[in-house]
Image (cartoon, helix red, strand yellow):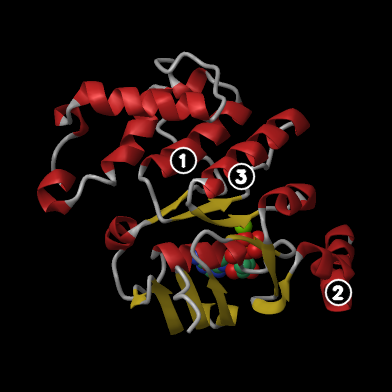
Amino acid sequence: MPAEPLLALSGVTKAFGGLTVVQDVGFDLPRGGRLGLIGPNGAGKTTVFNLISGVYPIDAGEIRLDGQPISRLPPRARVRAGIARSFQNIRLMPHLSAVENVMLGQHARAAGLGALLTPIAWMPRGRWRREAEELLAAAGLDIDPGEVVANLPYGIRKKIEVVRALAARPKLLMLDEPAAGLNPAETAELARFLREIAAAGTTLLVVEHDMGFVNEVCDRVVVLNFGRKIFEGSMAGARADTTVREAYLGAEAADAA
Ligand SMILES: Nc1ncnc2c1ncn2[C@@H]1O[C@H](COP(=O)(O)OP(=O)(O)O)[C@@H](O)[C@H]1O
Ligand SMILES: [Mg+2]
């Protein structure tokens, strides 16, 4: 019998005000897999992330993590079940330092209701802080961990957001356009870091427009167009697929119009 996938979507459907933006989407993500979720702008990629993390309820279908249905759990419970994500637009606390932002990610890991209600200041600070600083360093972030995030360049803030998600020690790490706005050197460095995370056992689900980056990081892709899955397979297969090519060309033509 094949091993249970870490994440399994089947028949996932979502409409906003009569407009179906995700329709009958299904895919499996095996434990330790690195799946790229790609497609033109507006294809429904971020919405799929929002449905997995519980920002919105699904209208139909099922989402399973480790074989357990999670589609009716509140977002908090999904975090505790092992899902962490970053957002397409940076959502760090700008007035807090880099290390404090990472510590907010660690906080999601503290189990039980009591811990959830515990202010971050009450945590055994030394140990958590040291681990957060080590995570920043492992990500190749050569910054003063005490620097306030608002003062740091965009590329660095983007990466801190990945580190914060990782600090929850998720089983599944979902990243929404992590390379957007990064320069080529930063992009290559982020790809290296993500491969390292994956090699250490974290399963990755990555939305990204930079196809070189997807090719570097992911072992498989699912392509969405107008909310439907139009391809699943290798990156090379996606590049060669006529339907996928037409979807991207169609989107380019629409953007140019
Ligand atoms: N909360 C929402 N309310 C209404 N429409 C939404 C909402 N979120 C996303 N959409 C619509 O769903 C479609 C898919 O959006 P999105 O998932 O952000 O696409 P992608 O991330 O692939 O660019 C778009 O047409 C978008 O306008
Ligand atoms: Mg998006």
Mark closer to the chain start, 3 or 1: 1
Q: Is residue 139 above or below residue 195?
A: above
Relative to residue 26, is residue 123 drawn left or right? left
Ligand 1 is found in the corner quadrant, namely bottom right
Q: Residue at x 27, y 29 (%)?
A: 128
The residue lying furthest to the left in this view is 114
Residue with the mark numbered 2: 241
Label 3 C-beta lies within 8 Å of the nearest ligand 2 atom = no
| Residue position for label 3 | 195
Lower sequence index among marks 1 and 2:
1
**Residue drawn 57% across and 25% down?**
140
Residue type, mark 3 in image: Arg
Is 41 situated left or right of 249 in this image?
Answer: left
Residue sitting nearer the eye, 95 or 198: 198
Quadrant for residue 106, please give it: top left
Closest to the observer, 72 or 65: 65
Give yes or no for contact between labels 1 and 2 (Cβ–Cβ under 8 Å). no
- Residue 145, by quadrant, is top left
In space, the residues marked 3 and 1 are separated at their CA atoms by 23 Å
Residue 175: x %, y % from top left: 55, 51
Quadrant in the rendering for residue 92: top left
Total number of numbered discs in the rendering: 3
Q: Label 2 amino acid?
A: Asp
- Circle 1 residues within 10 Å: few <14, some 14–19, many ≥20: few
**Amino acid identity at mark 1:** Arg
Mark 1 lies on residue: 91
